[in-house]
Amino acid sequence: MTLNTDALRWLMRTTTLALGLTLLAGCAIDKGTALAADFEEDWADAPDVAEIDTHGDNTLPFAGSATGTLILEDGASTDRVAELANELGEYIADHDEVTGEISADGITFAVAPDSGRTGDVVALWESLAADDRVASGLIGNGYRNEDDWNVEIVAVDAASALALFKDMAADADLYRPFSSAVTYLLVNTRQDTRPSLRVETGQDGNVPAAAIAAYEAVAAEYSVVSAGLAPDRAGIVVAAGTDLDQAGELARSVSPNLANIEVTSDSGT
């Protein structure tokens, strides 16, 4: 029996559709979502894990990535944090499109598939978690180089924020040897804290020494409400009624090479 043309075309379309459905069955269209679901399932029964937070990025059909964060129960021991970090490192080493984090004692840190790097980040986590000046923190992978780190810390007050920044930027013994690999460091105060302070390095790790000097000079003489300090600028807000000309002149006198220094009043004048 010979198939006519219409029947043959119908058979080809049906075969093509069946083949396509077979291929789709083995590959998730929203791959990032699927990877995130797999992460939750794989870690659901891990002891000392109180919560799992995941995010799937569906870049293209059948392409994507996911990030999973293990939020540990309060009181998890340092040994347990290190153990989970190593286990998570092994997991992401076997899952190329998945990144992992651990959150414990208010500090969240990225885990690397390299055990040595994971040991470094756990050491920094331990130092920050034990520091009474730290309210919370985030340790992430470098923006430009995956071998570097970016650290963002929220301090309990302005004095603690500046002291923490100086300790980390100076490679203080408390944070060695990890801090030498930090390319970006940001320390600020909690949103409801007054006075507030935000101090950060450049993306290449440059320390805002001139901005810090200007801030400290003004703070020693006047009441500072808030400040933002970076390698290329210093923005300082002083209490209402402060002589802005004198405060500004003082800031510029100690940091004459810092072009962008702005001293303003809390009243907005």
Image: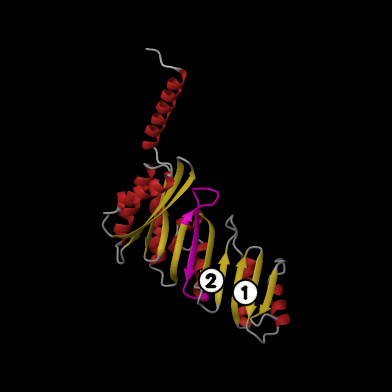
Q: Is residue 125 visible?
A: yes
> In this rendering, would 235 be left or right of 18?
right
| Residue segment shown in magenta | 140-158
Residue 205 belongs to the span the image colors magenta: no
Res. 25 image quadrant: top left
Q: Quadrant of the C terminus?
A: bottom right
Residue 248 lies, in percent from the top left, at 71, 77
Q: Residue furthest top?
A: 1
Q: Which residue is mark 1?
A: 215
Crowding near pointer 1: few (<14 within 10 Å), some, many (20+)?
many
- The residue identified by callout 2 is 162
The image quarter in which residue 262 lies? bottom right
Q: Is residue 14 above or below residue 169?
A: above
Q: Residue at left 46%, top 49%?
A: 57
- Which residue is found at the position 50% from the left and 77% from the top? 192
Task: Please say if the residues under marks 1 and 2 sit with CB atoms less than 8 Å apart.
Answer: yes
Q: Is residue 49 left or right of residue 57?
A: left
Q: How many marks?
A: 2
